[in-house]
Amino acid sequence: MNSKRSMWKVLFGVVGMGLLVTNCTLKTDDKTTDDDDSGCSPVGKKKTGCECPDKSIGYQTCLDDGTYDACSCTPANVGGGSSGGASSVAGSSNSNAGTAGETTSGGASPVGDAGAGGESGAAPIAIDPDDCYDCLTKLCTPEWDACAAEDENNPEVPSIPNQYCLSSSIDGSGQIEAVLLCIEAERAKGPVKRDVVRACGASLGQSANPSFFLWPPTEMTAATAGLVNCMADAPDEDEPGTWADSTNIPPNGTPKPWQDNTCAKLSCTSAQLPK
């Protein structure tokens, strides 16, 4: 995982505007699966979508007997206070919020609230406001783990080997890599709003044109969709993917600002203007 972190940062460092391709035609492969509620194959296949006790999304692995095991849930990486310009996040709050994908000024946005009876919230998680990857691994740990487990050697559907979430070498071929690189390129222009993020996802990273609006697209794997939904949905959202529907991105009007304590708000969509 450490090697993937290093390669991910290198990949973001060399991304250019040539990544964007507008008015493109997407290749569509029909996804098939031999799973149903009572069985699964092949052995070792991972399926996301099960709910963990903390309302996050986990994944299940296909066992030798043809059934899925219990939901695998990884606890969030909870650490100490912020340093080096990182944001400090704990619980949920509406304070110190930027607008439409912006982080608060000064490179740090302490967000958190007290529990019932004046008790303090959970220990803060240090988030780098300039590193979307850092936020996803910390605030969307189960979803990230499910994505990392789905690479070119373990695609969601073996018969469609070109559809997987994260490549083993972070070479840009994974779906989440393409989507996040599309978003990253748009950050050079200013804050990235919901409609552009949805376009990057709906086109699997090929275009930021809001005319791409189907969410999630049929070619996207469940692991990829789960990770993007964790990045963009409100922390207490009961229906994953609500961030992209017409209540938040009206056909005529301005998309709603990103919710507090989401990676979209904290580190994935804020403007990254050339220095």
Image (cartoon, rainbow, N blue to C red):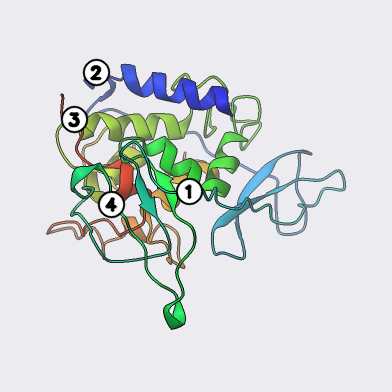
Q: Earlier in the sequence, mark 2 or mark 3?
A: 2
Tell me whether circle 3 and circle 1 mark residues in contact (CB < 8 Å): no
Q: Secondary structure at mark 2?
A: helix
Q: CA distance from mark 4 to mark 3?
A: 21 Å
Q: Circle 3 sits on which residue?
A: 188
Number of on-image labels? 4
Q: Earlier in the sequence, mark 4 or mark 3?
A: 4
Q: Circle 4 sits on which residue?
A: 109
Q: Quick check: 188 left or right of 53? A: left
Q: Earlier in the sequence, mark 1 or mark 4?
A: 1
Q: Circle 1 sits on which residue?
A: 80
Tell me whether circle 2 and circle 3 mark residues in contact (CB < 8 Å): no
Q: Mark 4 or mark 2: which is in front?
A: 4
Seen at 38% across and 45% down, the residue is: 82
User: Of the residues shown, which amino acid type is indicated by label 4?
Assistant: Ser
Q: Circle 2 sits on which residue?
A: 18
Q: Nearer the viewer, residue 123 or 266?
A: 123
Q: CA distance from mark 1 to mark 4?
A: 15 Å
Q: Secondary structure at mark 3?
A: loop
User: Of the residues shown, which amino acid type is indicated by label 2?
Assistant: Gly
- Residue 112 vs 125, above or below: the answer is below
Q: Earlier in the sequence, mark 3 or mark 1?
A: 1
Q: Nearer the viewer, residue 75 or 36?
A: 75
Seen at 25% across and 24% down, the residue is: 21
Q: Secondary structure at mark 4?
A: loop
Q: CA distance from mark 2 to mark 3?
A: 13 Å
Q: Mark 3 or mark 1: which is in front?
A: 1
Q: Mark 2 or mark 3: which is in front?
A: 3
What crowding class fits label 4: few (fewer than 14 Cα within 10 Å), some (14-19), or many (20 or more)? many
